[in-house]
Amino acid sequence: MPVPLHWYLILSALLFACGTVGVLLSRNMIVVLMGVEVMLNGANLALVAGARKWGMADGLVYVFIVMTVAAAEAAVGLALVIAVYRQTKSLNIDDLNLLKG
C-alpha cells in the first residue's frame, strides 16, 4: 500500500517549520545555517512528492537545482562563519557587529 501524498506534505511542512524555528530563535550561526538546510530539505521533499504523485519530471529537476543551491550555500556560509569566528572568536549572532560603519 503506497503512502498517501498528504503524509509527505505534512512531513515536509514539519521540516520547514522546524527549520524556520531554528533560524528565527537561534543565536548560533551554525544552527542558523542548519535551519536553512532543513528548510531546503522540506521544500525538496514536497517537490519530490509532487513529482511522484503526478508523474512529472519537473519537480525532480527543481530538486537538483535546490540541492545545488544548498551545497553552494553551505560552502559559502561555512566559509563566512569561519572568517567571522577568526575575527570575533564567537559564533553568537548578537556579538556580530562587523557590518556597522
Image (spheres, rainbow, N blue to C red):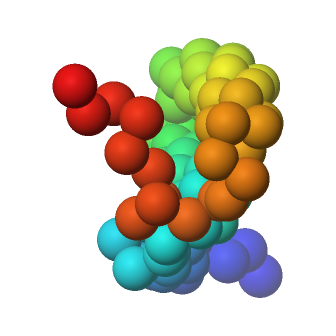
Q: Residue furthest left?
A: 101
Q: Is residue 20 left or right of residue 50?
A: left
Task: Return the x and y of residue 87 as percentages of the image width and height.
Answer: 67, 36
Q: Residue at x 49, y 72 (%)?
A: 27
Viewer-closest of 56 and 7: 7
Query: In the rendered image of this protein, does residue 42 appear above or below residue 9?
Result: above
Quadrant (top left/top right/bottom left/bottom right) for the N terminus: bottom right
Q: Is residue 22 above or below residue 78?
A: below
Left or right, residue 20 beside residue 33: left
Q: Observer-nearest residue: 8 or 26?
A: 26
Tell me which residue sits at (46%, 60%) in the image.
95
Quick check: can you spot residue 12? Answer: no
Residue at left 67%, top 77%?
3
Name which residue lies at 67% across and 59% down: 90
Residue sitting nearer the eye, 23 or 45: 23
Q: Quadrant of residue 32?
A: bottom right
- Does 93 sit above or below residue 78? below
Residue 67, x across and y down, in percent: 69, 29
Q: Quadrant of the C terminus?
A: top left
**Count of number-bearing discs:** 0
Q: Is residue 40 above or below residue 28?
A: above
User: Where, by quadrant of the figure, is residue 15 drawn?
Assistant: bottom right
Q: Where in the figure is residue 28, as x and y percent of width and height? A: 59, 67
Point out residue 83 in the picture as x, y percentages from the top left corner. 71, 29
The answer to whether residue 96 is visible is yes
